[in-house]
Amino acid sequence: MSFPDGPAGPSPAPINGQTPHPGRPGVRPAKRGRPGYDLDSLLAVAVEVFNERGYDGTSMEDLSRRLGIAKSAIYHHVAGKEEL
């Protein structure tokens, strides 16, 4: 019995434009970051919280709690509250 594409079948096709991991066929590289939070969505939430609590009354901790992400994830997008 022969397997023209190998014993596991054909090679996996890229999913969402991602190429499978070169060292591990069929395994996609891990995505980085939390889905759904880019700079635009982070800014939208920051505006909401600033409007509710005021700029001076809002901490980065407040923003991280509202977003459901760590403060360090916010700092991935901006240098600090002033930049928001």
Image (cartoon, rainbow, N blue to C red):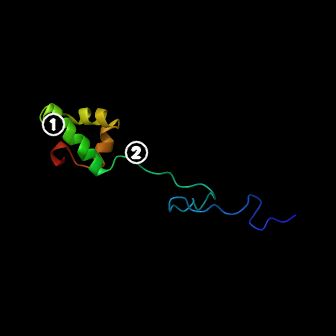
Quarter of the view holding residue 12: bottom right
| Number of the label disc, if any, that sits on residue 34 | 2
Q: How many marks?
A: 2
- In the image, which is nearer the foreground, mark 1 or mark 2? 1
Question: In what element is the residue under mark 2?
Answer: loop
Residue 33: x %, y % from top left: 40, 48
The three-letter amino acid code for the residue at tag 2 is Arg
Residue 45: x %, y % from top left: 25, 41
Left or right: residue 57 compared with residue 63: left
The three-letter amino acid code for the residue at tag 1 is Asn
* Mark 1 neighbour density, 10 Å: few (under 14) some (14–19) many (20 or more): few
Left or right: residue 49 compared with residue 5: left
Q: Residue at x 37, y 46 (%)?
A: 36
Q: Which residue is mark 1?
A: 51
Residue in the foreground of this view, choosing between 67 and 30: 67
Residue 39: x %, y % from top left: 28, 50
Up-down relation of residue 74 to residue 19 (above or below): above
Residue 68: x %, y % from top left: 35, 35
Q: Residue at x 13, y 34 (%)?
A: 54
Q: Do tag 1 and tag 2 residues touch (Cβ < 8 Å)?
A: no
- Which residue is most to the right? 1
Up-down relation of residue 12 to residue 32 (above or below): below
Up-down relation of residue 6 to residue 71 (above or below): below
| Number of the label disc, if any, that sits on residue 23 | none
Residue in the foreground of this view, choosing between 58 and 79: 58
- Which residue is most to the bottom? 4
Counting residues from the start of the chain, the first of labels 1 and 2 encountered is 2
Picture quarter with the N terminus: bottom right
Q: Residue at x 31, y 48 (%)?
A: 76
* Mark 2 neighbour density, 10 Å: few (under 14) some (14–19) many (20 or more): few
Distance of mark 1 from mark 2, alpha carbons? 25 Å
